Each structure stands twice: as structure tokens, then as C-alpha cells.
Image (cartoon, grey):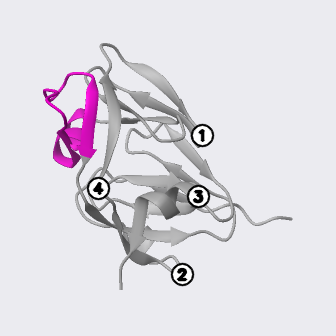
Amino acid sequence: MRPAEPVFHSSGVQGYSPEVRAVTGVIPARKLERTVRARFVDADCLVHTPEGAVRARAGDAIITGYAGEEWPVPRRSFEASYEPHGGVQMGVAGVYRRLPREVLAARMQSTFAVVLADGHSRLSGGAGDWLVDYGDGTLGVIADAIFLTTYETLP
């Protein structure tokens, strides 16, 4: 019988998760400053990310990454983590600059899952993917190739 995959839960509470801190090999990292395209949804919807379907609420940002992948960011988190770029106004579709942000990250050795703070959305990660704790009560799953180009590890 195979052991069950670990499941990590976003708490929605400020601070790093004790669940993630306990993972073997967890390290500090920093999300690099980058520009992304974002649009804002008018109604609740599901966004199909490479890691799973995620609920977005009216007003949330939908970000498009360099590989064409999309993911939602709650409006409050978006406004705290991104700033308008190139003359766009906050809340209007366009280019935004991601502010540098320190996180905790662990490159996972086996499959795992993350349940988001909404209690419904579930992301799936595979061996080699990264479990990321953003320190604001949210967790994420980042493919290794994307992690290596958008984060730097810290000493």
C-alpha cells in the first residue's frame, strides 16, 4: 500500500505555516521583480491552472505568466504585491510589476497537494515541484522550471 501524499493547507492567516516550516529542506527564497499581464474578473469563475482549478471572485486579478499559464490572485493580495507599470491604473487590465517578496520554499521529493484558503480549490504538485509559502496565509505549487526563473534562493 502506497503512503498518502502530503496535503498542505493555506490558512488565510498572516505568517508562515508550521506545516511548511516542518518540511525537510525548506529554504528562504525571494520572488524576483518581474512584469506580468493582469486582467480583472467581473464575476466569480474558475481558472484552470497547470496545478488545478482555482476559484476567483469578482474583482480578483488573473495573471498570465511567461509560459502562457494563468492563475488568480485575490484583489487584496494583488494590490499588496504588484504595482501598475507603464501608465496603467490599478484595477485596469495591463502590465504590472511584481514586487520582490521573501517566501519559504521546499523542492518536494514526491507528489503533494495544496488546499487553498477558500477550502475548495486544490493544487497538485509532483516530485521536483516547489511548495511555496508566501507568508500571508497562502501556499502555492510552482513547477521547477518556473521556480528557477522567477525566484532566487537566499542564504
Q: Residue 36: x, y in percent?
A: 35, 39
Q: Is residue 104 left or right of residue 82?
A: right
- Disc 2 residue type? Thr
Which one is in front in this view, the residue at disc 4 or the one at disc 2? 4
Q: Is residue 67 left or right of residue 118?
A: right
Find the magenta span and give its range.
75-97
**Residue at position x 26%, y 56% from top?**
136
- Disc 4 residue type? Glu
Q: Are marks 4 and 2 in contact (CB under 8 Å)?
A: no
What mark, if any, has residue 118 been given in the picture? Answer: none
User: How packed is label 4: few (under 14 Cα within 10 Å), some, or many (20 or more)?
Assistant: some
Give the vertical position of 102 relative to 126 (above or below): below
Q: Earlier in the sequence, mark 3 or mark 1?
A: 1
Q: CA distance from mark 4 to mark 1?
A: 22 Å
Q: CA distance from mark 2 to mark 3?
A: 21 Å
Q: Secondary structure at mark 1?
A: loop
Q: Secondary structure at mark 2?
A: loop
Q: Secondary structure at mark 3?
A: helix
What mark, if any, has residue 33 been given in the picture? Answer: 4
Quadrant in which the C terminus appears: bottom left
Give the vertical position of 36 relative to 2 (above or below): above
Q: Report how many numbered discs are placed on residues in the image.
A: 4
Specify the farthest residue to the right.
1
Which one is in front in this view, the residue at disc 1 or the one at disc 2? 1
Q: Nearer the viewer, residue 149 or 15?
A: 149
What mark, if any, has residue 24 been given in the picture? Answer: 2
Q: CA distance from mark 4 to mark 2?
A: 27 Å
- According to the picture, the residue beneath numbered tag 3 turns out to be 145
Q: Are marks 3 and 1 in contact (CB under 8 Å)?
A: no
